[in-house]
Image (tube, rainbow, N blue to C red):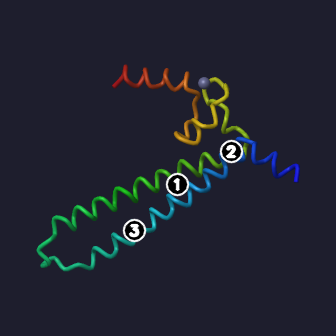
């Protein structure tokens, strides 16, 4: 019993649970979009409504791409969570707030991210 309540308050455990949830969602989106794409290829070109079909295909393709990027990011984050390094900033080894990881899956603390963003703006 003691262990259950402890793991509930363990932020890394919370992150892992949340990431797994997000992973399932991303995988579902990927599968749904893929199905939509394969269905829309069956429609004959004489249908007359090709522009909205093309639009739908483009949307489904974009959703698939986003879902696959998200899946990769979450899988990486999960590996880091299991290593116990997910709350460590890759630049300064400072602690990344768990809320920040959940929302952005960032690998840097806010301070280091600001530096990176400023550099990117500078070189853009
Ligand atoms: Zn940092």
Q: For mark 1, give the secondary structure.
A: helix
The local crowd at label 3, few if under 14, some if 14 to 19, many if 20 or more residues have their Cα within 10 Å, is some
Q: Quadrant of the C terminus?
A: top left
Q: Quadrant of residue 41?
A: bottom left
Which residue position holds label 1?
Answer: 71
Q: Quadrant of residue 53?
A: bottom left
Q: Earlier in the sequence, mark 3 or mark 1?
A: 3
Which residue position holds label 3?
Answer: 34
Rounded to the nearest angstrom, the CA distance separating label 3 from label 1 is 15 Å
Q: Residue at horizontal 55%, vertical 41%?
A: 105
Q: Residue at horizontal 55%, vertical 21%?
A: 111
Q: For mark 2, give the secondary structure.
A: helix
Q: Position of residue 17 (x, y in %)?
A: 66, 52
Q: In the orientation shown, which residue stands out farthest toward the right?
A: 2
Q: Is residue 116 left or right of residue 10?
A: left
Q: Is residue 30 placed above or below 98 in the rendered structure?
A: below
- Total marks shown come to 3
Rounded to the nearest angstrom, the CA distance separating label 1 from label 2 is 15 Å
Q: Earlier in the sequence, mark 1 or mark 2?
A: 1
Q: Residue at horizontal 88%, vertical 54%?
A: 1
Which label sits on residue 81? 2
Q: For mark 3, give the secondary structure.
A: helix
Q: Quadrant of residue 51?
A: bottom left
Q: Is residue 74 left or right of residue 118?
A: right
For the residue pair 30 and 76, the one nearer the viewer reads as 30
Rounded to the nearest angstrom, the CA distance separating label 2 from label 3 is 29 Å
Q: Position of residue 65 (x, y in %)?
A: 40, 55
Q: Residue at horizontal 40%, vertical 68%?
A: 34
């Amino acid at each position: 019993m003691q262990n259950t309540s402890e793991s509930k308050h363990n932020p890394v455990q919370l992150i892992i649970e949340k990431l797994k949830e997000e992973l399932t969602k991303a995988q579902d989106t990927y599968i749904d979009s893929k199905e939509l794409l394969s269905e829309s290829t069956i429609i004959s070109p004489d249908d007359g409504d090709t522009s909205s079909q093309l639009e739908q295909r483009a949307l489904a393709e974009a959703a698939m791409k986003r879902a696959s990027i998200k899946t990769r990011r979450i899988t990486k984050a999960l590996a880091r969570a299991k290593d116990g390094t997910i709350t460590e900033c890759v630049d300064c080894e400072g602690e990344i707030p768990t809320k920040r990881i959940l929302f952005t899956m960032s690998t840097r603390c806010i301070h280091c991210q600001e530096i990176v963003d400023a550099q990117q703006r500078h070189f853009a």
